Image (cartoon, rainbow, N blue to C red):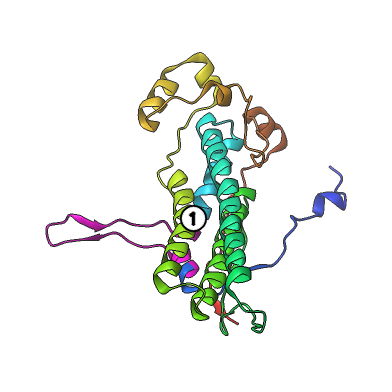
Amino acid sequence: MTTTPESQLGPLRSEIKFTLHTQYAHKLWTGRNSTKDENGKITQSSILSMPNALKLIGQIQQDAAQDDPYADDYLLRFEEKVLLYRQEIQQLVNKLIGIYADRLPESIEFERCANVSPISYPIYVNSQLGYQLLYLLGDFDNLARVTMTAAHIALLTRADAQEWLEAGAVLVRRCFGVIENYKHSGITRKDAQEENARYQAAIKRMGYEVPNYVLTGERRADYAPFIRYNSLLEDDNEQPVESQVTTNTEHE
């Protein structure tokens, strides 16, 4: 077999850093473990961390590429939420900008606050929806900066600022909630079409039946991967690419 220059080409890579300025966004990045009282009762629920969320999205995308209808359903629902919530956070920012315009005297000039030592995360995520989730957290970080600036210059009370911050943070947590309980179904659309034993077991394991519009492929996420059927994998000797995210931090 003749080796061509094209066959020696490796995959494309680029260096990307994700920078956060506020402790509120950083807390969403790191997540939170659940806490229990002395009787073992959960007193504070856990929150998924961003690195774990990105890994989950990568796994769901891999499963969707293998024609798993449940994975496709998760991607569709997640995409609808993350894109909607990005719009909602931008609406919150626009409302705050309106407050600045209404309440700030023309004689005052200022710059939005920025952290003198922000935290930067070198990242590589093999999932377009993973990047959309990162963008959502970045949007929230921007909202937090605008909110804290408004509180600092007395355009908002501290109580009002906390309400604005919670209104944004809950949107990020809701996106985590779409995927945090994801389980690998182990089926393909062919199993669903045949309604075989694997499909019946998957329904019990997953807790619901996939909507027909997902089974037929009528609706898929805009950022869903191409479906790579087993026969194509065997012919091309391709293997699913694992999603990666590095979580090392550095201060700039």
Q: Residue at x 55, y 61 (%)?
A: 137
Q: Quadrant of the N terminus?
A: top right
- Count the marks: 1
Q: Using the image as rendered, state which of residue 17 and residue 11 is in the foreground.
A: 17
Q: Is residue 99 above or below residue 206?
A: below
Q: Position of residue 103 (x, y in %)?
A: 57, 72
Q: Position of residue 151 (x, y in %)?
A: 49, 76
Q: Decide whether residue 243 is among the magenta residues.
A: no
Q: Position of residue 61 (x, y in %)?
A: 58, 42
Q: Residue at x 51, y 21 (%)?
A: 191
Q: Position of residue 55 (x, y in %)?
A: 51, 53
Q: Is residue 4 above or below residue 221?
A: below
User: In the shown orientation, is residue 199 left or right of residue 143?
Assistant: left
Q: Decide whether residue 51 is among the magenta residues.
A: yes
Residue range corresponding to the magenta coloring: 25-52
Residue that numbered label 1 is attached to: 172
Q: Is residue 156 above or below residue 127?
A: below
The residue most toward the top is 194
Which quarter of the picture shows residue 12?
bottom right
Q: Using the image as rendered, state which of residue 1 and residue 178 is in the foreground.
A: 178
Q: Residue at x 53, y 48 (%)?
A: 57
